[in-house]
């Protein structure tokens, strides 16, 4: 049996997956492919490859052959929108291209690609539940998600050309839970949160434990194609903000888009204006296929994931805990 | 203590009364102790509610108000009439329960809705209620929903398929979602029907709801037969429903598209009261309504593949439209007054 390689093992989800895999099959069965070595305590193998280098495909091919890799989990993606879009493009789009080329050349049997339900795009015309067949049309917010979309396209084209390599795309809903720190969890760290006046879409917040167990299942299941990995139930934005005891400040949307773009250019917001679509319209994915074919049933609802995050961010004050005890 | 002893009933002796008061005072002390203990057990950040916030505002002015207190008070107010978990389409039962008195007022007092033929709605399983649309704002959907919810023995929820113009309109969109409506689309409708839900649809769409007053009770084209395809694909029976009364609540005299278009509305209605009377013009006229449900049209005879036959779809759609038009005409012939039925 060959080894499992994880690219982006330094990422939040990649790191968690690495830990679970090392627990399951020992440090020797897993290779972490990343710039930074994984925590020494894990004792997993580590190969340093920079996916943004022009000759990264050859370096990867060498790694895959030497380590006898038969399963590859590609988790090297940015969760947060970045201002230097050039680097994001090199890593996410071109990096996936070289990675797929190397995997195909090395005869890797199984590829798991980390993707995002945000790629469906938040649009007024969306059905309430987006199935995997729905076209990926992130639309106005494409600028920020373009590279992730291209990564999926590269993976799909390799999957077509190399039918013996089984490629599974996991589209994860936004992660929310202990230790998850992304641009949308940071929204919940502020006291005052601007929202779009008169809009209250449903959000899907996925607990990281659910995300990891879905990825583990996908590695073992003999399936191909795309899967939405989503939590049990969605939560309305307003309810989420009030659960976290935030002050929502409604902003009329014609002003909000322009203001957000300006603030983004000035470096004062976490995301460009395209993100506002996601607090205006629905982008809720349907997890039925993952349940049917992967046997994945989420343990947490969006509300529970949010509460888990809040407990992690705001542990009960020491005095209060003593009083209870 | 002796002060309060004076208020005990006269039939008891003074001594007996004071003993009673002492006993009560003791109980109060015990309760106060318990309250203090409970207060201490709550996390420090949790101790200030709305009354404290108001008191601070009163004593110290705006400087005394803390963000946390304000946010907590707001959250408390929000969850007083919203539940923390909604259904997968965003239906919030607690929110609907809160608004129920208002809806019931509209149903029983304002429009005095008279529902007949509810026995044609099955007690369980999928069903598609198809009705005529009118009234500028989707009050007819609300009333059909209430009729099924309150007058049908099975107390069913009827999930309305809402037009894009409502389902995407700021303020109205979250309101509709919370009260159980879903944006009209084949995917959404099919999902609900496959779950065995009762679904309501107004195939006239925008053409119906924004109908000119002189066109009242003349059914517009039934879309492109999407509801028939939905029924064919899921095998759900179609229950025709005629709504009479709704077409006069906001008599549209003119449609000022030059105002509506920049606002993102498909039309901007001018009625005798709106925009002349401002917000007061949004009050619908108190006509008398009737809802008539007819025999379900079964789709089992055709297979799901019939949904791909446009001629058949259109024929079935026209047949149902005809049924509803006849029901409306019958009602109108019997109706003597718009206001009193």
Image (cartoon, rainbow, N blue to C red):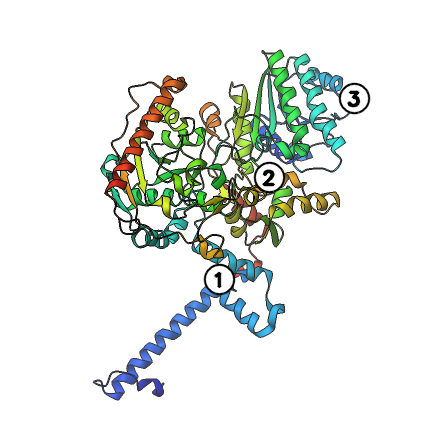
Which disc number belongs to residue B41?
A: 1
Give how far apart the Cα atoms at labels 3 and 1 are.
60 Å
Q: Which residue is mark 3?
A: A54
Q: Nearest the camera: A91 or B75? A: B75
Furthest toward the right, the residue is A54
Picture coordinates of residue B82, whole percent (x, y): 44, 51
Left of B195 or right of it: where is A281?
A: right
- Are labels 3 and 1 assigned to the same chain? no
Is residue A319 visible to the viewer in this orientation of the structure? Answer: no
Give how far apart the Cα atoms at labels 3 and 2 are.
35 Å
Q: Nearest the camera: B60 or A277? A: A277
Picture coordinates of residue B154, whole percent (x, y): 26, 41
- Are labels 3 and 2 assigned to the same chain? yes
Query: Reading the chain from its start, which is encountered first: label 3 or label 2?
Result: 3
Q: Chain of mark 1?
A: B
The quadrant of the picture occupied by the N terminus of chain B is: bottom left
Q: Secondary structure at mark 1?
A: helix
Q: Chain of mark 2?
A: A
Q: Chain of mark 3?
A: A
Residue displayed at 39% across by 17% down? B309
Is residue B164 visible to the viewer in this orientation of the structure? Answer: yes
Q: Nearest the camera: B165 or B66? A: B165
Which disc number belongs to residue B229?
A: none
A22 lies above or below A269: above
Which disc number belongs to residue A277?
A: 2
């Amino acid at each position: 049996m060959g080894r499992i390689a994880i690219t982006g093992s330094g990422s939040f989800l990649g790191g968690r997956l690495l830990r679970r895999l090392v627990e399951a099959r020992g440090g020797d069965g897993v290779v972490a492919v990343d710039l930074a070595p994984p925590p020494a305590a894990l004792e997993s193998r580590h190969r340093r490859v920079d996916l943004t280098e022009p000759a990264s495909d050859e370096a990867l091919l060498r790694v895959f052959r030497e380590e006898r890799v038969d399963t590859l989990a590609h988790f090297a993606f940015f969760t947060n929108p970045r201002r230097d879009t050039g680097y994001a493009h090199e890593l996410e789009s071109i990096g996936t291209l070289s990675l797929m080329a190397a995997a195909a050349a090395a005869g890797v049997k199984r590829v798991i690609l980390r993707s995002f339900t945000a790629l469906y795009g938040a649009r007024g015309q969306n059905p309430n539940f987006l199935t995997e067949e729905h076209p990926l049309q992130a639309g106005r917010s494409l600028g920020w998600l373009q590279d992730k979309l291209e990564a999926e396209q590269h993976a799909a084209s390799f999957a077509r050309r190399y039918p013996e390599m089984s490629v599974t795309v996991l589209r994860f809903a936004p992660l929310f839970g202990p230790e998850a720190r992304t641009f949308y969890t940071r929204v919940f760290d502020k006291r005052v949160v601007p929202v779009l006046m008169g809009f209250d879409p449903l959000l899907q917040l996925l607990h990281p434990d659910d995300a990891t167990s879905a990825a583990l299942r996908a590695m073992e299941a003999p399936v191909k194609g795309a899967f939405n990995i989503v939590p049990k139930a969605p939560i309305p934005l307003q309810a989420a903000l009030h659960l976290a005891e935030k002050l929502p400040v409604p902003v009329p949307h014609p002003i909000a888009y322009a203001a957000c773009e300006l603030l983004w250019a000035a470096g004062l917001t976490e995301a460009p204006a395209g993100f506002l679509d996601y607090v205006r319209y629905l982008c809720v994915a349907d997890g039925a296929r993952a349940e049917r074919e992967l046997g994945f049933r989420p343990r947490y609802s969006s509300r529970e994931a949010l509460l888990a995050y809040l407990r992690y961010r705001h542990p009960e004050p020491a005095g209060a805990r003593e009083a209870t005890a | 203590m002796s002060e309060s002893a004076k208020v005990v009933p006269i039939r008891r002796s003074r001594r007996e009364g004071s003993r009673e008061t002492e006993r009560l005072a003791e109980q109060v002390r015990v309760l106060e102790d318990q309250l203090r203990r409970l207060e201490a057990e709550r996390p420090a950040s949790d101790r200030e509610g709305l009354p404290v916030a108001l008191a601070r505002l009163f004593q110290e002015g705006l400087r005394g108000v803390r963000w946390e207190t304000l946010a907590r008070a707001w959250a408390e107010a929000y969850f007083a009439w919203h539940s923390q978990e909604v259904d997968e389409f965003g239906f919030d039962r607690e929110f609907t329960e809160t608004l129920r008195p208002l809806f019931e007022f509209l149903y029983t007092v304002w429009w005095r809705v008279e529902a007949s033929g509810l026995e044609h709605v099955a007690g369980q399983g999928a069903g598609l209620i198809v009705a005529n649309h009118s009234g500028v704002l989707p009050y007819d959907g609300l009333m059909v929903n209430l009729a099924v919810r309150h007058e049908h023995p099975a107390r069913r929820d009827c999930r309305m398929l809402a037009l894009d113009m409502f389902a995407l309109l700021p303020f109205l969109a979250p309101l509709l979602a919370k009260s159980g409506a879903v944006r009209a689309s084949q995917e959404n409708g099919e999902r609900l029907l496959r779950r065995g839900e009762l679904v309501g649809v107004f195939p006239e769409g925008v053409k119906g709801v924004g109908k000119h007053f002189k066109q009242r009770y003349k059914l517009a084209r039934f879309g492109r037969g999407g509801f028939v395809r939905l029924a064919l694909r899921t095998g759900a029976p179609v229950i025709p429903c005629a709504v009479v009364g709704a077409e006069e609540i906001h008599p549209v005299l003119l449609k000022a598209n030059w105002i509506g278009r920049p606002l993102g509305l498909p039309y901007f209605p001018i009625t005798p009261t709106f925009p002349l009377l401002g917000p007061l013009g949004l009050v619908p006229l108190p006509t008398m309504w009737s809802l008539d449900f007819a025999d379900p049209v079964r789709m089992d005879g055709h297979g799901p593949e019939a949904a791909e036959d446009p001629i058949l779809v259109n024929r079935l759609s026209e047949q149902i439209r005809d049924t509803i038009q006849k029901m409306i005409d019958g009602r109108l012939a019997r109706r003597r007054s718009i206001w009193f039925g």
